[in-house]
Image (cartoon, rainbow, N blue to C red):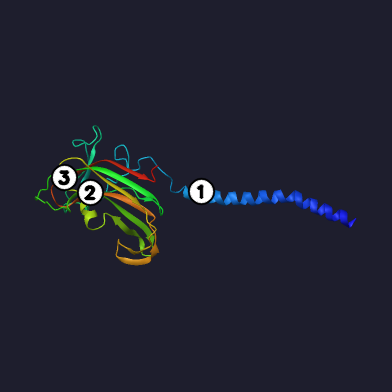
């Protein structure tokens, strides 16, 4: 009788073992699914995220207050039928002291690839400025939520040659393409550049593109057109 009980118990174990395997596989599959779902926050995109107005609303044309110095200009076009963005000089009558136009903030994660570009036409300087660090340009500010507040922890262009190469200089008077292709680093930053304060180590979590003309009070004009922005393009 005891022998039969042992045989029956052994038989039950043999039958149940595949069920234990299936259960373990199901738990592992669930874990993989959760991990994949986490990556959905930063999908590959072949859709242009920085379409210019009036077709898109990525660029904030309402920057500043008082008389606006940022406006659509149908008299200067890169693509026929599509107005460009014109940046007029900054004066004491407006709040746009940086003479820039900012894009929309977008989330990113470490390892994400940002590819951005814009066609730029820079006219003549009103002061005869021939500096290699003057004219019109496209840039990127990289943000993080820090213990000192939400602010810029890195930006492109950096100093030196990279900064100089970011400009379409005064007097170029021809449409010129400027492009950024960067990957979000795994660096931990400890300074909020927006206010110069130190902060707990943080990684970049968002970014914004910007267009700018230097010097802000130069009466020369610059135009921007056909901007493009992709995150993890395939």
Residue 99 can be seen in this image: no
Q: Say whether residue 226 is visible.
A: yes
Image coordinates of residue 121 in percent, x first then y, are 19, 42
Question: Residue at point 80% right, 53% down?
Answer: 10
Which label was assigned to residue 137? 2
Residue drawn at (22%, 51%) of the image: 165
Do callouts 3 and 1 mark residues in contact (Cβ within 8 Å)?
Answer: no
Query: Closer to the camera, 198 or 119?
Result: 119
- Residue sitting farthest toward the right: 1
Circle 1 — which element? helix
Give the left or right position of residue 80, taking residue 201 as reference. left
Precedes in sequence: disc 1 or disc 2: 1
Which is nearer the eye, 148 or 181? 181
Q: Nearer the viewer, mark 3 or mark 2?
A: 2
| Residue receiving disc 1 | 37
Residue at 35% across, 56% down: 143
The tag on residue 221 is 3
Question: What's the distance in space between the residues labelled 1 and 2, CA to CA?
Answer: 37 Å
Whether residue 29 is situated above or below residue 199 in the rendered picture: above
> Residue at horizontal 88%, vertical 57%?
2
Describe the element under mark 2 as helix, strand or loop: strand
Q: Nearer the viewer, mark 3 or mark 1?
A: 1
């Amino acid at each position: 009788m005891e022998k039969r009980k042992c045989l029956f118990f052994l038989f039950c174990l043999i039958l149940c073992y595949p069920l234990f395997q299936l259960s373990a596989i199901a738990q592992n599959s669930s874990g993989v699914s959760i991990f994949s779902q986490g990556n959905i926050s930063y999908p590959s995109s072949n859709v242009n995220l920085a379409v210019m107005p009036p077709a898109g609303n990525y660029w904030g044309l309402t920057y500043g207050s008082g008389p606006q110095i940022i406006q659509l200009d149908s008299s200067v076009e890169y693509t026929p039928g599509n107005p460009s963005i014109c940046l007029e000089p900054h004066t004491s009558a407006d709040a746009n002291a940086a003479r820039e136009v900012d894009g929309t903030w977008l989330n990113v994660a470490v390892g994400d690839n940002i590819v951005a570009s814009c066609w730029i036409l820079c006219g003549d300087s009103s002061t005869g400025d021939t500096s290699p660090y003057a004219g019109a340009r496209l840039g990127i500010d990289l943000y993080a939520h820090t213990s000192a507040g939400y602010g810029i922890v890195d930006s492109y262009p950096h100093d030196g040659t990279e900064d100089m190469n970011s400009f379409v200089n005064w007097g170029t008077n021809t449409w010129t393409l400027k492009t950024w292709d960067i990957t979000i680093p795994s660096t931990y930053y400890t300074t909020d550049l927006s206010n110069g304060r130190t902060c707990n180590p943080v990684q970049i979590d968002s970014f914004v593109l910007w267009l700018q003309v230097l010097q802000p009070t130069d009466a020369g004009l610059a135009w921007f057109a056909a901007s493009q922005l992709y995150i993890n393009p395939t």
